[in-house]
Image: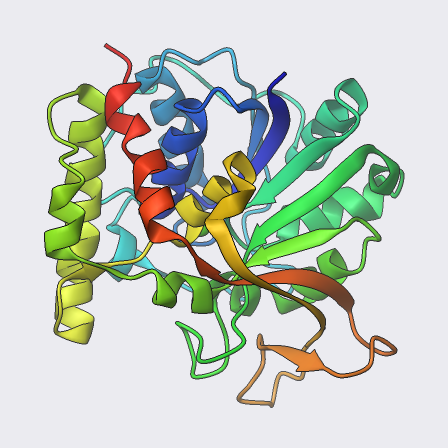
Amino acid sequence: MAQKIFIDTDCGIDDAVAIMMALSSPEVEIAGISCVAGNTSLENVLNNVCGLLNFYKRTDIPVYRGCSTSMLRISHNADKIHGSNGLADVVLDTGGKTPEAINAAEGIFAAAKAYPGIKLITLGPLTNLAFAFNLYPELSELISEIVMMGGAVGPGNVTPWAEFNFFYDPEAAAFSLGTGVPVKILTWDATVAGFMPEEEFLRLDMNGTPAGDLFIEIQSFYLDFMENSTGSRKIGFPDPLTVACVIDPAIAIETENMSLCMILNRENEKRGASVVVSDSDGADGTADVILKCDMKRFSELAKRIKINSPK
Ligand SMILES: [Ca+2]
């Protein structure tokens, strides 16, 4: 039977690919998607998710409106990476799909009650998750695992120390590491270790179906961004790797259990970093931290986006 999953997302380019991968894989079944500000504004995230579900003719999957800023109302913008609407300026028709009347925390709780043992996958800042667990502590008994994209052991992608999702809302990240639910983290380190040069990306041969074409269109925007910022055309898959590790856990080939402590001091240049500490006393939580993935195996999974495309 398919593993029930719930996805929390700040739907930018790689979130969209991650959701497409989940929708193309029989091993998992999405029970709901909650939206949070991060890569782009909450309104853009809602439109991107509703548009993507309409594209896949899966408007039966409920979408929930979540937090529009981080807990401390500090906003950061990632337009340069993800385009003005968060999705490489590709506007998908929502087909009239709108978010549910209840909010993200209520949506997460409803899904957890309906499907005990569900896995919660977070692809954006952890603001919604923190609110959900604060409002409904019983979620700790209902959710079997939280799988997060976030954090960096080595250099981050926003500062030399911090990765975007944890940096955007470090208070929420600290709270979410300590819910008592087992946590698995796909780090920025694993993303960098899996950077794919353009030649290899093109060898995926994704064009030719509606979903394959969409994949190429939005990822090409990201390739251009990478070339402008790093000088080389290569692509990273942070959110898709996170979902891939749920679909096929063997994709994670290097994982270490670590005690983590978030740096929260607003004067500290390392604010938003998840520091590895030797003693779990005083840590915000422990997690299985994925540092490296099998990119050949991942590529095979990504090809399902083309193969299992909607007509
Ligand atoms: Ca994301």
Task: Tell me which residue sits at (82%, 48%) in the image.
Answer: 134
Q: Quadrant of residue 286?
A: bottom right
User: 79 or 163, which lies in front?
Assistant: 163
Task: Tell me which residue sits at (51%, 53%) in the image.
Answer: 252
Where 142 sits versus 184, above or below?
above
User: 43 or 112, which lies in front?
Assistant: 112
Q: Position of residue 102 (x, y in %)?
A: 67, 25
How many numbered marks appear? 0
Q: With 162 as the anchor, is 93 left or right in this view?
A: left
In this view of the protein, can residue 12 be seen by the observer? no
Q: With 199 as the anchor, is 62 left or right in this view?
A: right
Where 270 sits versus 94, above or below?
below
Q: Position of residue 243 (x, y in %)?
A: 49, 41
Q: Quadrant of residue 64?
A: top right
In this view of the protein, can residue 209 be seen by the observer? yes
Q: With 220 as the anchor, is 79 left or right in this view?
A: right
Q: Position of residue 25 (x, y in %)?
A: 44, 24
Task: Tell me which residue sits at (64%, 80%) in the image.
Answer: 275
